[in-house]
Image: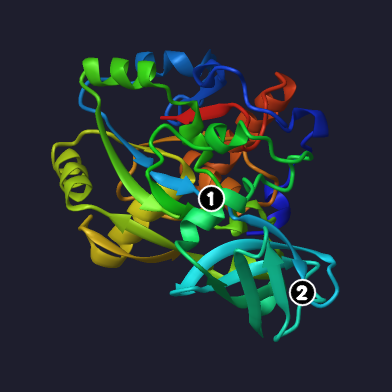
Amino acid sequence: MRIEEFDYHLPRELIAQFPLAERDRSRMLVLSREKGEIIHSYFYHLPSFLRAGDLIVVNDTRVIPARLIGRRRKTGSKVELLLLREKERNQWIVLGKPGKRLKPGDEIVFGEGELIAKVVASGERGEREVIFSYSGDLYSIIEKIGHTPLPPYIKRDDLPEDRERYQTLFASSPGAVAAPTAGLHFTKGVVNKLIEMGVELASITLHIGPGTFRPLTEEETKKGELPPEYYRISPETAEKVKRALSQGRRVIAVGTSTVRTLEGVFKERGEIVPSSGWCSLFIRPGFRFEVISGLLTNFHMPRSSLLLLVAAFAGGELTKKAYEEAVANKYRFLSYGDCMLIL
């Protein structure tokens, strides 16, 4: 497998910079794996492509305002930190900007001094380890002074409305620095229609990290693992998935993060069980899917691990065909863009 096989031309004007006013008005390309057919539709028609007994599994992670803008105590120069993951209480792994200038011992002051970060170690890819000092509750302070960590391909500053719009309807477990974007299209109206027709819903948690935006290198495709992200599957969800599989009903994942969580646990445990830990599963062509039989997903960056996952599920040629159709029909791409339903 060569990473060049998963490259394609993405016109810059197709990268959505703002969300639609109404979530469920996104366009939806429906791809049949069996027939190889493509249907152009809209997300609010999702119920017409599903059937009673289907189990939809969503990711309930909530994006935290993880972009912190402060100043170095010594020089007063501007510094940005992107929170990646909490290593232990008050100790975080972050990305710094400008990263090269941040050395162990440096201190960054945020807001009016209510939060201070001290750099204690350097890592790979510009990562730094910091210890926060503050008075009160750390997450409350982050909510107050932090910014929505919009993806790097959205070329604008975050706006107050992004706080809500870059969250899914299901967001309830804080910890992600990127939204599970396939879930952004759901509205209460669509969910109610699905429930009325006998579709079942369940949720997992996977806190998405910044690696989701990064194009893969040839070397990374050979490693077989992605940066670890924390996941959790509740007893209720485990039971729903096991029951659906035993009864031969379809399990439809909303987003690649949901796929990686379900398939990762099955691969490790041989079944879906209540569990939590770190998911680093890298799904690429040749992977054998044991849990999902359908996938709702947005359109992804060239050479990304997300695109490889889609190709693994839909097949390389069908994926290429679908993306060519989406570009030709001027679908909106990436986080705030349109979606694809693969059945």
Q: Position of residue 100 (x, y in %)?
A: 81, 76
Q: Specify whether residue 68 is in view.
A: yes
Residue at image x 22%, y 46%?
Answer: 237
Work out whether 6 lies above or below 229: above
Residue at image x 65%, y 52%?
Answer: 213
Is 37 displayed left or right of 48 in the figure? right
Identify the disc placed on residue 73.
2
- Quarter of the picture containing the N terminus is bottom right
Q: Position of residue 78 (x, y in %)?
A: 81, 62
Is 319 displayed left or right of 176 in the figure? right
- Residue receiving disc 1: 143
Q: Residues within 10 Å of mark 1 (few under 14, many from 20)?
A: some
Q: Which residue is more in the foreground, 284 or 263?
A: 263
Identify the disc placed on residue 85.
none
Q: Position of residue 205 (x, y in %)?
A: 36, 51
Q: Which residue is more in the foreground, 218 or 61?
A: 61
**Given this view, does label 1 or label 2 mark the residue nearer the observer?**
2
Residue at image x 61%, y 31%?
Answer: 161
Rendering quarter of residue 89: bottom left
Q: Which residue is more in the foreground, 236 or 51?
A: 236
Q: Amino acid at mark 1?
A: Glu
Q: Position of residue 118 (x, y in %)?
A: 64, 78
Work out whether 92 lies above or below 58: below
Q: Report the Cα–Cα distance between label 1 and label 2.
A: 22 Å
Is 132 displayed left or right of 196 in the figure? right
Secondary structure of the residue carrying numbered label 1 = helix
Q: Amino acid at mark 2?
A: Arg
Q: How many marks?
A: 2
Work out whether 52 lies above or below 113: above
Secondary structure of the residue carrying numbered label 2 = loop
- Quarter of the picture containing the C terminus is top left
Q: Earlier in the sequence, mark 1 or mark 2?
A: 2
